[in-house]
């Protein structure tokens, strides 16, 4: 391996160093970012459900308004 310019102890050290750095970055960066993105996705999903619920309430209110408007004024008015 020396003829190819590869120093075996240095290569092993670099592989171990890469593994340690990968684990540290996984723990410090990936997990918190993944959790943050998951929480954001949950908030967006809840907001969409709330928007659908409000849209349905608005449709019901419009339907009630139209039916009352079609009935005409109250008797004795």
Image: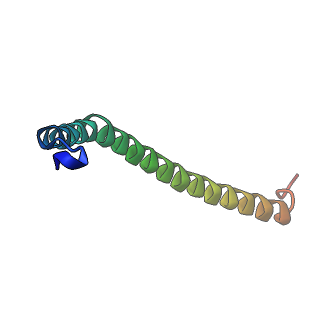
Q: How many numbered markers are drawn?
A: 0
**The one of 77 and 18 positioned closer to us in this rendering:** 18
Q: In x, y percent, where is residue 12? A: 14, 43
Q: Is residue 19 left or right of 56 when viewed as pictured? A: left
Left or right of 41, for residue 15:
left
Which residue shows up at 24% across the image and 49% down it? 4
Q: Residue 77's x, y, as percent?
A: 88, 52
Depth check: give the residue in front, 71 or 44. 44
Quarter holding residue 17: top left
- Dividing the picture into quadrants, the one containing residue 57 is bottom right
48, above or below 21, in the image: below
Front in this rendered view, residue 37 or 59: 37
Q: How is the image coloured?
A: rainbow
- Left/right placement of residue 22 relative to residue 49 reads left
Residue 16 x/y as whole percent? 15, 41
Q: Residue furthest left?
A: 9
Identify the residue at image location x=32%, y=36%: 29
- List x then y, in percent, for residue 39: 39, 44
Q: Does 46 sit above or below residue 20?
A: below
Question: Residue 9 appears in which quarter of the rendering?
Answer: top left
Which one is nearer the viewer's eye here, 15 or 62? 15
Residue plotted at (17% across, 50% down): 1
Rendered residue at 25%/41% (across/down): 22
State left or right for residue 67 relative to residue 30.
right
């Amino acid at each position: 391996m020396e003829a190819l310019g590869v120093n075996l102890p240095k290569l092993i050290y670099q592989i171990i160093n890469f593994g340690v750095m990968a684990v540290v970055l996984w723990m410090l960066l990936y997990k918190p970012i993944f959790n943050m993105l998951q929480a954001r996705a949950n908030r967006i999903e809840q907001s969409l459900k709330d928007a659908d619920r409000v849209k349905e309430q608005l449709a019901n209110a419009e339907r009630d308004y139209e039916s009352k408007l079609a009935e005409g004024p109250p008797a004795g008015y």
